[in-house]
Image (cartoon, grey):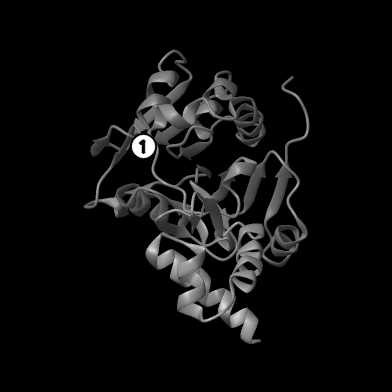
């Protein structure tokens, strides 16, 4: 029990200080460097912290520009987006969240009659070519790093929309921290959207798991469909069963 408590305290200490040396940890917790290394290995294996030069740092997903994220794992993102688009039916009113995976959905919606509400500039531009896609912008302040419209003042304005389905993005996902995002301004919109009556789809590739960002905008239990590119471990599978989440694993090529 003392070991478990110490490991938790180490995690909290690293979170508070962002990065620390092994020597500092040994001094603070009054244990040998061998013990600290063993405790650190456990936290690293759980994805909570990561090795850095001279010590360890919190495994914290940072805010990156939209263009930086767009090219990463593109093939997997397209597979996930195609699987998500397959759930969309003609006549649906959907929300597509600002994200590099959700953006890829437009390619697979081009032959459907759909109304799309979105807060992402690139999604609006990509949908311009398809007259069958009715696009409604959320408006607000344009954040250039994320290419998304957001506002602190009117997140509740989305409550008036009767969405059939909402397709959400995330910077990091874990059972303990839920579904997280790096932009506090965006998170108010995301939180409001998820709390509506629509089916909630979360589109995330395998690199997003066991990481978290600055703001939690919903608990993982609030998701109805979790679409990803890898089979998740037993802890997530058990959690999905307990919370009626449908796991959709993408293990096939684009058709």
Q: In which quarter of the image is the N terminus?
A: bottom right
Number of marks in the rendered image: 1
Quadrant in the rendering for residue 110? top right
The front one of 38 and 48 is 38
Label 1 crowding class (10 Å Cα cut-off): few <14, some 14-19, many 20+? many
Quadrant in the rendering for residue 140? top left
Label 1 element class? loop
Q: Residue at x 58, y 29 (%)?
A: 90
Location of residue 51 in the rendering, given as x and y in whole percent from the top left corner: 55, 52
The front one of 80 and 19 is 19
Location of residue 181 in the rendering, given as x and y in whole percent from the top left corner: 43, 50
Say left or right for 78 vs 170.
right
Q: In which quarter of the image is the C terminus?
A: top right
User: Mark 1 = which residue?
Assistant: 119
Above or below: residue 65 compared with residue 113: below
Location of residue 70 in the rendering, given as x and y in whole percent from the top left corner: 48, 28
Q: Residue at x 77, y 34 (%)?
A: 251
Location of residue 148 in the rendering, given as x and y in whole percent from the top left corner: 34, 36
Above or below: residue 46 compared with residue 247: below
């Amino acid at each position: 029990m003392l070991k478990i408590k110490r490991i938790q305290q180490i995690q909290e200490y690293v979170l508070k200080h962002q990065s620390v040396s092994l020597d500092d940890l040994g001094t603070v917790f009054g244990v040998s460097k061998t013990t600290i290394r063993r405790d650190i290995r456990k936290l690293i294996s759980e994805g909570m912290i990561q090795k850095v030069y001279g010590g360890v740092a919190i495994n914290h997903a940072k805010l990156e520009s939209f263009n930086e994220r767009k090219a990463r794992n593109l093939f997997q993102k397209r597979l996930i987006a195609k699987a998500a688009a397959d759930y969309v039916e003609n006549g649906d009113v959907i929300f597509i969240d600002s994200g590099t995976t959700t953006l890829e959905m437009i390619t697979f919606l081009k032959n459907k009659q759909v109304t799309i509400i979105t807060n992402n500039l690139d999604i609006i531009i990509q949908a311009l070519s398809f007259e069958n896609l009715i696009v409604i912008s959320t408006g607000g302040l344009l954040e250039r790093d994320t290419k998304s419209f957001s506002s602190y003042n009117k997140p509740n304005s989305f409550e008036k929309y009767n969405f059939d389905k909402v397709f959400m993005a995330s910077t990091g996902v874990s059972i303990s921290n839920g579904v997280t995002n790096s932009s506090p301004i965006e998170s108010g919109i995301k939180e409001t959207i998820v709390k509506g009556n629509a089916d909630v789809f979360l589109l995330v590739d395998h690199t997003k798991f066991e990481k978290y960002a600055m703001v939690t905008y919903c608990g993982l239990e609030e998701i109805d469909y979790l679409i990803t590119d890898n089979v998740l471990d037993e802890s997530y599978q058990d959690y999905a069963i307990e919370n009626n989440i449908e796991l959709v694993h993408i293990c096939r090529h684009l058709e």
